Image: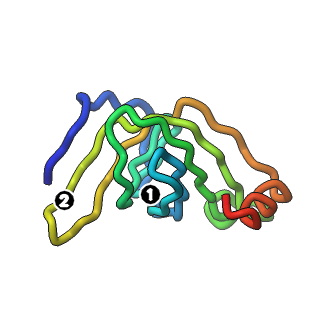
């Protein structure tokens, strides 16, 4: 597996959780699955052609079962790609480590409206 990136400086606990994620970057909207999540970053298994340093916006939906809340919680994040992992040509899965620079919780009505608009 080929890795491009900076040395790892992980902070905080990482949670191994696979959640659907929508990534908005220079190449458009892509979908992926988280491999692990922390308060400061996320590793995403996806196929977008993003480079190190690329600014990205991504939305993570935290399921109500995980949080013990009445409904799912959507988190809108802004961050940067800090590492890219490219697997062999047959796998064609790319992993992206992204640092989360900022985030906000999206209220249920706003999240439903955004999904309706394709965002």
Name the image colouring: rainbow
Q: Closer to the observer: label 1 or label 2?
A: 2
74 and 52: which is toward the camera: 52
Q: Is residue 39 left or right of residue 1?
A: right
Q: Position of residue 51 (x, y in %)?
A: 33, 41
- Return the disc, 1 or 2, that comes first in the chain's sequence: 1
Image quadrant occupied by the C terminus: bottom right
Q: Is residue 32 left or right of residue 95?
A: right
Q: Outermost residue toward the bottom? A: 90
**Within-10-Å neighbours for mark 1: few <14, some 14–19, many 20+:** many
Q: CA–CA distance between discs 1 and 2?
A: 16 Å
Image quadrant occupied by the N terminus: bottom left
- Residue at 53 percent of width and 38 percent of height: 39
List the residue tagged with mark 2. Answer: 87
List the residue tagged with mark 1. Answer: 34
- Residue at 45 percent of width and 51 percent of height: 27
């Amino acid at each position: 597996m080929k890795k491009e990136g900076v040395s790892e400086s992980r902070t905080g606990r990482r949670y191994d959780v696979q959640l659907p994620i929508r990534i908005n970057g220079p190449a458009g909207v892509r979908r992926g699955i988280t491999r692990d999540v922390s308060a400061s970053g996320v590793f995403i298994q996806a196929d977008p052609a993003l480079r190190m340093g690329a600014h990205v916006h991504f939305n993570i939906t935290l399921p109500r079962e995980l949080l013990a809340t009445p409904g799912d919680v959507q988190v809108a994040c802004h961050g940067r790609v800090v590492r890219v992992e490219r697997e062999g040509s047959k796998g064609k899965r790319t992993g992206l480590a992204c640092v989360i620079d900022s985030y906000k919780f999206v209220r249920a009505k706003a999240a439903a409206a955004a999904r309706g608009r394709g965002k």
